[in-house]
Image (tube, rainbow, N blue to C red):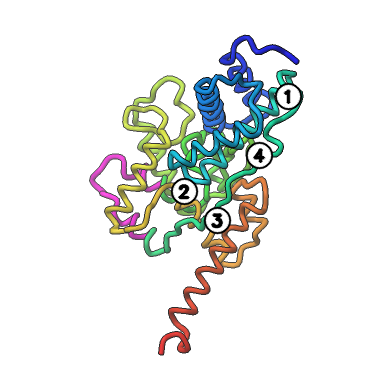
Amino acid sequence: MRLIRNTKLVIRDFCNYLQLERGLSLNTLESYGRDATHLVEFLDSIRVPLNEADTDILHTFLCTLRDMGIAPRSQARILSGIRSLYRFMRMEGYIDTDPCELLEAPQFGKHLPEVLSLEEIDNMILALDPDKAETPRNHAIIETLYGSGVRVSELTDIRISQTNLDDGYVLVTGKGNKQRLVPLSPESIALIKDYLEIRAQQKIKPGCDDILFLNRRGGQMTRVMVFYVVRDLASRAGITKKVSPHTLRHSFATHLLEGGANLRAIQEMLGHESISTTEIYLHLDKTRLRQELLDHHPLYNR
């Protein structure tokens, strides 16, 4: 068994492995790195080396997360990062047995995402201020998020060179650096074309020439910026739901399912690796149908 001389170097090698060998996204990479660092800090506090932690100690670590008020879903995500760390350590010979094998994940119910109605999405678009310079860009962003179901990280990384407006497709890079072709709606295509004419007059920062959506300074938009754009429009539209760019993605998938789209086709468009991830929209649709029954059937409204 290899001796760990520097824990920080092990974490660094682990992150390099995730990036180079497994091709995880930058967001996942950063999350796993933070999770590993939090575990090391906990183990240091009880004076247990990283390669000597057993299942009971790791269970205690998870209990501290629960006591800190961290939600079960977040606990499960952290556990996923810890499992990956110990699998890496076993592969590299730092440990002989994996202490995570018998570690149980926290239980949590299936979360049904918030969904906007078509009227609410229309109201968000109507809330756009025609006098603001960024409105053509923001309009194109809203239509692209809802019209294609792309993730916000995929949206901010869209390249002009990978966008074919004539054929109505864009090549996006999703989780795990996996690429897929995503169809664009006619409305999205028209709005992107209008925005590109305005964008051509903008001073662009070096390295951002191929980025589709730019901020006012000519740089690449961040996920946080898009979040604020969506949240502000929802507020202006009088929507009281908790709305984010992901809400538009959920709405895209739900409305497709309600319209009769095949679940496999929705899975492919969303870039879900497993069909089980897409099946949450079946649960959502059943919940909506039940509510329709309760609201409108005469037996329930006497």
Measured along the vertical axis of the image, is residue 123 above or below residue 92?
below
Q: In the displayed image of the protein, which residue is found farthest to the left?
A: 131
Q: Is residue 3 left or right of residue 185?
A: right
Q: Is residue 177 visible?
A: no
Residue drawn at (75%, 18%) of the image: 93
Name the residue carrying label 1.
Answer: 90
Q: Quadrant of residue 284?
A: bottom right
Name the residue carrying label 2.
Answer: 246
Name the residue carrying label 3.
Answer: 109
Measured along the vertical axis of the image, is residue 86 above or below residue 47?
below
Q: Are marks 4 and 3 in contact (CB under 8 Å)?
A: no
Residue 142 drawn at (x, y percent): 41, 49
Q: Are marks 1 and 4 in contact (CB under 8 Å)?
A: no
Image mark for residue 103: 4
Residue drawn at (39%, 37%) of the image: 224
Between discs 1 and 4, the one toward the N terminus: 1
Q: Is residue 100 left or right of residue 8?
A: right
How much space separates mark 1 and mark 4, taking CA atoms? 16 Å
Q: Is the C terminus in the top left, top right, bottom left or bottom right quadrant?
A: bottom left
Which amino acid lies under the numbered mark 1 shown in the image of this protein? Arg
Residue drawn at (65%, 59%) of the image: 263
